[in-house]
Image (tube, helix red, strand yellow):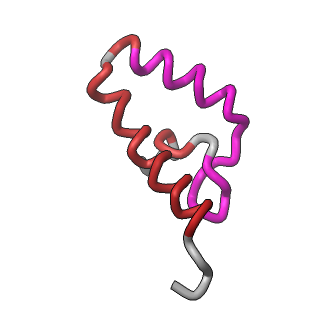
Amino acid sequence: MEGGWTALDAPLEFGGQGLPHTLKFVVDEMVCSTNLSLGMYPGLTHGAISALHADASESA
């Protein structure tokens, strides 16, 4: 997580790297093909960031 691998395509303001979504798919595919259990953890972070980015308010 400290290396930023769990949030490759997340916005910079949320601690992500802001990389293209297609690059995230490539990295996810490589990680999941070697260890599916490990590869699923970044998906949880991505889902949480996406939900916050779409629905959270600044005042919360």
Please identify the residue farthest to the bottom as the structure is shown: 59
Q: Is residue 20 magenta?
A: yes
Q: Residue furthest left?
A: 37
Q: In percent of the image, x 59 and y 41: which residue is there?
A: 8
Q: Is residue 7 above or below residue 51?
A: above
Q: How many marks?
A: 0
Q: Nearer the viewer, residue 47 or 45?
A: 47
| Residue situated furthest front in the rendering | 55
Residue 22 located within the stretch drawn in magenta: yes
Q: Quadrant of residue 25?
A: top right
* Residue 29: percent from left, percent from top: 50, 17
Answer with left or right where residue 17 lies relative to residue 41: right
Q: Is residue 59 above or below residue 1?
A: below
The percent position of residue 47, horizontal first and vertical second, equals 47, 47
Q: Quadrant of residue 41?
A: top left
Q: Is residue 24 above or below residue 53?
A: above
Residue 6: percent from the left, percent from the top? 47, 42
Q: Nearer the viewer, residue 25 or 54?
A: 54
Q: Residue furthest top?
A: 33
Q: Magenta region, mostly helix, strand or loop?
A: helix
Looking at the rendering, the stretch of residues picked out in magenta corresponds to 10-32
Q: Residue at x 44, y 50 (%)?
A: 2
Q: In the depicted view, which residue is nearer to us: 40 or 3?
A: 40
Q: Could you tell me residue 15's position as x and y percent?
A: 57, 59
- In the figure, residue 23 lies in which quadrant? top right
Tell me if 40 is positioned left or right of 23 in this view: left
Residue for point 48% across, 16% down: 30
